[in-house]
Amino acid sequence: MSTALPPVLDAWRAVSAGARYEGSLPLERLPRLRTSLADAEGQVDYVVQFGRDALDQAYVELAVKGLLPLQCQRSLERFLQPVELVQRLGLITRESQEAALPEGTEPLLLEAGAELHPAELIEDELILALPVVPIDPEGGELSAEWRAAADTEEKPNPFAALAALKDRNK
């Protein structure tokens, strides 16, 4: 069953029901991510699936795909960074349970109420997917032109006046 993403949900009920949420999330609704973007135009598509694996471990799996508007640090122009990620989060209630998670599963520590904000999970994964230094891969190479004449000019010595005083006192 696929439904729209609720703002808050009970993680254990979602796991029991095998809930699946699919849709699009506007970038303007992701305030922490927006600070790293060139603008908030666009959206990301998501699939959030709850369930239990073969070892009876509760999980939530996020699949997110979209284009993030970033500012190229080489050209300072806006470009769209494609993002496509799949992340499985193992639901745990104590840190000691982290060691039992299967390889490739990240832990998600739930509080006593098991309240989960799925849009924040999507936002967290998008923030982690951002490049440290955004550079448009399709942007051209920048070339610098250096003036050679600046190196050949004779510059006055700022200590020439001191040298003249020293010579005069001898």
Image (cartoon, rainbow, N blue to C red):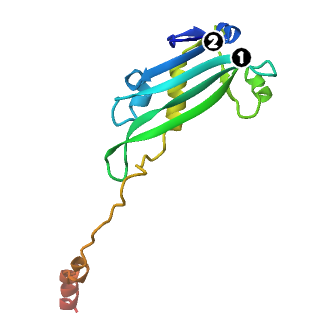
Q: Which mark is residue 164?
A: none
Q: Nearer the viewer, mark 2 or mark 1?
A: 2
Does 38 sit left or right of 56 as displayed? left
Q: Amino acid at mark 1?
A: Thr
Is 37 situated above or below 1? below
Residue in the image at 50% along x and 33% along y: 127
Residue 150 % position (x, y): 22, 77
Q: In the depicted view, which residue is nearer to us: 2 or 147?
A: 2
The disc, 2 or 1, on the residue closer to the chain's N-terminal end is 2
Number of callouts in the render? 2
Q: Amino acid at mark 2?
A: Ala
Does 4 sit left or right of 92 as displayed? left
Is 97 situated above or below 156? above
- Label 2 and label 1: CA atoms lie apart by 20 Å
Does 55 sit left or right of 156 as displayed? right
Callout 2: few (<14), some (14-19), or many (20+) C-alpha neighbours within 10 Å? some
Q: In the depicted view, which residue is nearer to us: 5 or 94?
A: 5
Kindly indicate the quadrant of the structure image that contains residue 125: top right
Q: Which residue is mark 1?
A: 93
Callout 1: few (<14), some (14-19), or many (20+) C-alpha neighbours within 10 Å? some
Q: Which residue is mark 2?
A: 19
Is 149 situated above or below 137? below
Kindly indicate the quadrant of the structure image that contains residue 51: top right
Which quadrant holds the C terminus?
bottom left
Residue in the image at 78% along x and 29% along y: 99
Residue 122 % position (x, y): 53, 25
Residue 3 % position (x, y): 54, 11
Q: Secondary structure at mark 1?
A: loop
Q: Are marks 2 and 1 in contact (CB under 8 Å)?
A: no
Residue 121 % position (x, y): 55, 23
Q: Secondary structure at mark 2?
A: loop
